Image: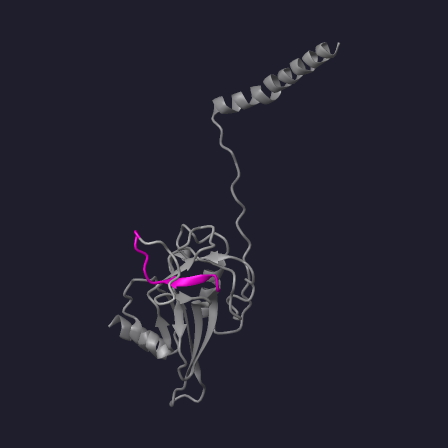
Amino acid sequence: QEVQALKNYADAGGNLLLLLDPQTDSGLEPILKDWGVELDDRIIIDATSALGPAIPLINNYGTHPITKELANRYSFYPLARPIDTVKVKNVEAVALLVASDRMWAESDLSADKEIEFNSDKDIAGPFDLGVALTKTIDKKDKPEKQESRMVVIGNSAFATNNFFNEQFNSDVFLNTVQWLANKDEQTLSIRPKEPANRRINLTPIQASLLAWLSLVIVPIFGLVMAIFTWWRRR
């Protein structure tokens, strides 16, 4: 029932955002098939990532309103899957997040197995991690054509509390939601970052100790060292 309700919603001009982690059964294959989207269950490996091999760092984005301001800026997607598309009538697909040629999709992450590219089982980059799709809906009872939009990203963790404000993850997510929410043309950009809270909260004892160190102990130590140096030079 839920899948059929979503299909009806999209066919009526509704927009969908699908964040689909690997090795999970979403049950949304009927919808994805209508839009020409194919999921790959392998996990993207980035051997050069400073965050870990299973956390690909993306700085290559497609030409799309969601990502046009993000060129050469990093976002990351822990435990992500590739997204593939095939040509479907009335559907236009544009890559959003592109895994580089230094990445691959790994088929076997066994604990006792060394992570390395296997050309027989794995997929070498580049390939898509996220895509944006636009579907033209031609209603016979209406002279004007409707449009439905969908964004599919092979990861959901990038938008969770732990990672949302890291790098440019929040801009990817918020730009995606804004593009899906507004039919009209809009400017999607990089949002200003919240200033970090760098205040230091000290207890009365710590504040008193800091005052003694800065106003008494350190100056006295400097004076003693100056006198000692003068005395030695004499």
Q: Position of residue 93 (x, y in %)?
A: 45, 76
Name which residue lies at 70% across and 14% down: 229
Q: Residue at x 32, y 60 (%)?
A: 108
Pick whichever, 83 or 158, lies toward us. Answer: 83
Specify the quadrant of the image occupied by residue 130.
bottom left
Residue 5 pos. (x, y %): 29, 74
Q: Is residue 15 visible?
A: no
Q: Looking at the image, is 108 positioned above or below residue 83?
A: above
Residue 173 visible: yes
| Residue under the point 37% across and 55% down | 115
Where does the image place residue 210, in percent across and percent down from the top left?
Answer: 55, 23
Where is 28 relative to 221, above or below?
below
User: Which residue reaches farthest left?
Assistant: 1
Q: Is residue 98 left or right of residue 141?
A: right
Q: Along the line of sight, which residue is nearer the eye, 158 or 211?
A: 158
Name the quadrant of the N terminus: bottom left
In the rendered image, residue 217 lying in the magenta stretch gets the answer no
Question: Does 115 appear above or below 146?
Answer: above
Q: Which residues are magenta?
A: 101-112
Q: Quadrant of residue 212?
A: top right
Q: Looking at the rendering, in which quadrant would you find the C terminus?
A: top right
The residue that appears at 30% across and 55% down in the rendered structure is: 110
Vertical placement of residue 190 versus 31, above or below: above
Residue 72 image offset from top left, x and y in percent: 56, 60
